[in-house]
Structures are given as C-alpha cells and as structure tokens.
Image (cartoon, helix red, strand yellow):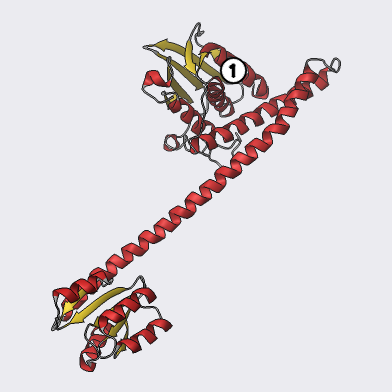
Amino acid sequence: MDVARLLIVDDEENLRSSLCQAFRMEGYEVTGAADAQEALGLIQGATFDVLLSDLMMPGLDGLSLLEKARVLLPEAVIILMTGQATVESAIRALKGGAYDYILKPFKLEEVFHVMGRGLEQQRLRRENLALAEINRRLTEIDQIKSDLLSAITHEFRTPLTIIYGWMDLLLTGQFGDLAGGTREGVEAIGHSARRLGRLIANLLAYVEFERQEAAFQDQVVDLGEILRTTATQLAAEYAEKRVRVEFLREVQGASLRADPEKLALLFGNLVENAIKFNRAGERILLDAWTADGAATVSITNTYGRIPPERLSRVFEPFTQGDMTLTRAAGGLGLGLSVARAIVEAHGGSIALCPAEPQGTTVTVTLPLGGPAAAGGSG
C-alpha cells in the first residue's frame, strides 16, 4: 500500500513540529507549513492525500485555504483544527468541503482516528472510481466487439448467398449434368457453405440477443418437419463420421407457435453438437413427445460425455464441451449459448445430463402456445 502524504499547516511552530514528528513515527510522509500561503505553494508543486490545517492563522485563514485547496486537491481529506469553534464556522467548514474538524486541545489518538476514517473513505472512493472506469471501458469494449461481430456477420452473408445460388444452379442441372466426381465436389462445397451459414447465423443471433434486439416471427411450426429436415441435412454434411441419426418415435402433428428460423437454428446447433462430439460410427438418438401443453425433444449422442466439471459452463458464450488445445470438433463455442437464448426467449427450458454408458443428452421443452403460453413476453 502507498504511504499517505500529509501536509500539516499551523502557525504555532511547537504544535506543528509535534504533529509532524508524531505522524512520521506512524509511517506517514509528512510536510509542514507555517501558514496558508506556504501551504498553497507546496500544494501547487506536489500532491497530498491529507491536509490538516489550523482554522485561525495570520493572513489567509483555514477556510480560505480550504476553498483553494479543494480545487487544487479535489481528492484530499481536509481536516481543520480550531480552538475557537462555533456552529457557524463548523457549518462553513463542512459546506466548504472539509471532511471534519477537531477542537483544540486534542489528543493525538483523536487526530489519528479522524484521519484514519477519512483515508478509508478516500480509498473506497478511489476504488469505486477505478471500478466505474473499468466498467465503462468494458462496456465500450463489449460495444466494439458487438459492432464488429455484427458488421462481419452481415458482410459474410452476401458472398454466402451467391455461393448458395450458384451451388443450387449446378446441382439442379441448369448448366448440364454433373459427372459423379464433380457432383460430389459441389455437394461438399454445399455442406461447407451450410456450416458457414450456421456459424454466421449463430454470430448474428448472439449479437442480437446480447443487444436485446432479437426479432421473432410468431408462426405455427411443424416440430416433426424441422427435426427430420435438420437430421437429414446434418447427417449428409457429416457423412464422413458415419453417424446414424435414429428417431425413437415419430412426432406426428406436433405443432407449436414459434419462430421457424430460430427453431431450425436451435435444433441445428444441438444435432450438430451431438454429431461433432460423437465418435465415428456411433448413433444420435432423437426423441420427441408432447404432454401438458408442451413439446419435449431429447437428443442423445452415444459417445462423447461432457466432463461434470464443465457442465456448468457449456452454455457460456465461446465455450465448448471440448476445451482441449486440439479442439478437434472445431467451432466457436456459440451453439449451446445461442440455443439456450432461443429456448428461453420461447419460454422454454434446456438441460444437459450424462447418458449411459458414455454419452450426453440435451433436453429441450417448449410451450406449444409459444412464449405467451409460458408467461413470457414473446
């Protein structure tokens, strides 16, 4: 801790010397001044944490010194000493910015106590100001990060749209039939483009939820159709892993009010995570059912259990279940964070738990009537 710097101002030399010596023995860095003019000269050339001044002095008195010192030393603890205290002088001192005043004669313990309280208050005030500045800078950095992510995301969307367009033209034979190897190459481009598209969609969703600017389309959505489409697309994208996606039961006629794009992103993130963190040749088990006005979906990978100590963090932004240096599964670690934001915005719940023997199950529950049915704002 830095040593507090103390300026003692009193025209009584004996008292001033005694105070200087006493405070030096307590470990303070002490300077003495015989009058207000000398004190002002010292203040203009140095910084002091505490100003301990007599009230009645020849020339400028303590109140005049207080007025000038308050400007030159805005953070200093200023304490006035007087043997002729009146209610009026006390009020003027406190209104002028003095921390306290002490009646002469006094005991040193009394001065130490008052000054100690003043320094503690000064320390807390400085810490609060420092924390406020840190918070301001963090808010500024968050805003810059958010603006940058938003700009990058929007800029990526345009070329990605062009890639999608040309890819569809090629695959639908608009430029003639594609030879086997060429078709496989175009399909591989398409799979990679869709992965990039989800990454961009997650970045954009993350920024929107962070800024509380996420817009929702309230539509009747076929849950079974979304799950089937998602499972088929992702199984094709990750064909090299030879992971089988199996439905434990078919969801027939399960409709709910939701945002279709965000629901597709939600289950796309969850199924993709289950595949990425699964072992080649394993299975993904999808189950879905409706009961008590809600739809529940469970997605289980049969291999790839998240360590218990990481379960509490996997929903944090930019966090993965796989936090090793190799990060073999890739990705930004936004999938589960965005998934939770989407689920909660729909008035639902999401949870992760271990699945025997070595897997993980994520369970999502959504109200069939949308956020309003769950008491949300929509």
Residue beneath the point at 67% across and 26% down: 194
Image quarter of the N terminus: bottom left
In the image, residue 320 above or below residue 239: below
- Which of the pair 71/302 is nearer the observer? 71
Residue beneath the point at 66% across and 31% down: 196
Instruction: Say whether residue 334 is visible.
Output: no
Instruction: Say whether residue 285 is visible.
Output: yes
Residue 189 at what x, y percent from top left? Answer: 74, 27
Say left or right for 50 vs 283.
left
- Which of the pair 55/333 is nearer the observer? 55
Residue beneath the point at 57% across and 32% down: 202
| Residue 117 quadrant | bottom left
Residue 126 at what x, y percent from top left? Answer: 36, 64
Q: Residues within 10 Å of mark 1 (few under 14, many from 20)?
A: many
Tell which residue pokes out farthest to the bottom in this image: 13
Image quarter of the C terminus: top left
* Residue with the mark numbered 1: 231
Residue 129 at what x, y percent from top left? Answer: 39, 60
Say left or right for 176 vs 105.
right
Residue beneath the point at 32% across and 62% down: 124
- Which of the pair 28/51 is nearer the observer? 51
Give the SS element for disc 1: helix
Tell me the amino acid under the disc marked 1. Ala
